[in-house]
Structure formats: C-alpha cells, structure tokens
Image (cartoon, grey):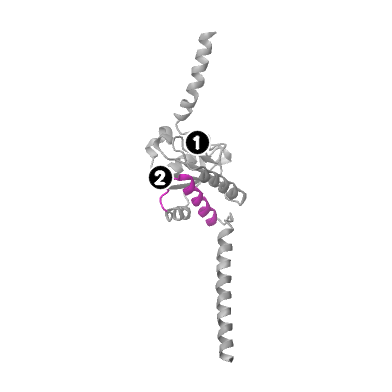
C-alpha cells in the first residue's frame, strides 16, 4: 500500500511537468480557453484582465478570436523551432486547433505578431479554408513590437483587428469626453472674444 501511494504521488507530481512538455501546450489550453498565458513570464494583472475583457467584447461584437502569448521558447514545447516566428506559429497552431476551433487565432511574441484563420471541413480534420489574412497582417505590422508586456500588446492588437473587421468594441469614455470638453471650451472662448470685440467696436 505504501509503495502504491508513493507511485500515485509521483505520478501526480509529474503531471504538470508532462503537460508543460507537451508538443504544443497552447493547443491544449486554447481548445477551451481564449487566452494562452506564458508559463514562466509574469505579466501585469491589469494587462491580463484588460486583454481577457477585450477578447470577450470582440466575440460579442462578432469578431471571435483566441490569443496565444508566447514569451519564451519553453511556451512552445517541442515546437520550439517556431519561436520568434509568430506568423509561422500562428498557421501551425491554427491548423492544430482546426477541428475544435473556428475562431481567428492571434499569436503575440516579443518580436511581433501572427494571425491565421483555419476552418476544418465539417469540423474535423485539416483546414477546409485557410486565411492568412493579408489585411490583418498589414494592420499588425503597423504596430510596434510587443516587447515584455505581451498582454497589453495583445489587447491593442485585438482592438485594431476587431476594428478592421467592423466590430465596435467601444473605448474609454474619458477620451471622447475630454476632447468634447476641450472643443466646447475653445468654442466658448472664441465666442466670448468675438462678443467683446463687437462691444468695443460699438462703443
């Protein structure tokens, strides 16, 4: 019994390591989740929460997307040769998810982005239609390199892509309010100055 208990304990301890040694960890996570977060890179909580909320808004607005944040080669498992090749990995990962996923797939690596859309035939097997999305790649190429905060970069990228596909995610109301207030103040100041000039001219 003691030997059996020891073997079970060893198996449980080895389970996370086995999961991380998977051929492609992100493909396992993205079957059910919408974001794959790096294993060894701690991202700012505010950024990860903002990205999760933006992805949910995008789906509700008609742009369903799943995002893989790849900070290190370790996040790719045995697909490590695709590190720092975000577009190639996006195609690879989208094809792996094809039988489970019909959403767009965005990959964020420190040096850039990858985007792909793969739909499997009758929900099973290889891609029936694959869109490397030239317009989407151009939009992503206009963004600065993601750097360390992959979640913040992913949030910006999802917003820009959703905009390209006609999905309105809204935005912080503080910016348009501030702009409107500035315009009103400027207009009020100009009107007051004009009124004073007219009064002086009459006097």
User: Residue lying farthest right?
Assistant: 60
Residue 149, image quadrant: top left
* Marker disc for residue 27: 1
What x and y, as percent, mark residue 112?
Answer: 41, 48
Residue under the image location 40 percent in, 50 percent down: 145
Q: How many marks?
A: 2
What x and y, as percent, mark residue 203?
Answer: 58, 91
- Contact (CB < 8 A) between labels 2 and 1? no
- Front one among 80 and 179: 179
Q: Please give left or right for residue 172 compared with residue 71 in the image.
A: right
| Residue with the mark numbered 2 | 110
| Magenta residues (range) | 144-164
> Is residue 122 depicted above or below 153 in this figure?
above
What x and y, as percent, mark residue 100?
Answer: 56, 38
Residue under the image location 40 percent in, 45 percent down: 110
Around disc 2, counting alpha carbons within 10 Å, would you say few (fewer than 14), some (14 to 19), or many (20 or more)?
some
User: Residue lying farthest front?
Assistant: 203
Residue 161 among those drawn in magenta: yes
Residue 47 among those drawn in magenta: no
């Amino acid at each position: 019994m003691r030997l059996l208990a020891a073997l079970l304990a060893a198996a449980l301890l080895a389970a996370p390591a086995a999961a991380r040694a998977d051929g492609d960890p992100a493909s396992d996570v993205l079957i059910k989740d919408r974001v794959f977060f790096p294993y060894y890179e701690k991202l700012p909580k505010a950024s990860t929460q903002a990205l999760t909320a933006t992805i949910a808004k995008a789906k509700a607005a008609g742009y369903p997307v799943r995002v893989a944040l790849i900070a290190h080669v370790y996040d790719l498992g045995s697909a490590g040769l695709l590190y720092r090749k975000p577009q190639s990995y996006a195609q690879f990962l989208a094809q792996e998810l094809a039988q489970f996923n019909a959403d767009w797939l965005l990959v964020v690596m420190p040096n850039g982005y990858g985007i792909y859309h793969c739909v499997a035939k009758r929900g099973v097997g290889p891609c029936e239609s694959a869109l490397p999305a030239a317009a989407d790649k151009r939009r992503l190429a206009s963004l600065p390199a993601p750097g360390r905060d992959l979640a913040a970069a992913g949030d910006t990228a999802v917003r820009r892509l959703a905009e390209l596909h006609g999905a309105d995610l809204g935005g912080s109301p503080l910016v348009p309010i501030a702009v409107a207030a500035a315009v009103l103040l400027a207009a009020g100041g100009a009107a007051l100055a004009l009124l004073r000039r007219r009064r002086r001219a009459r006097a």
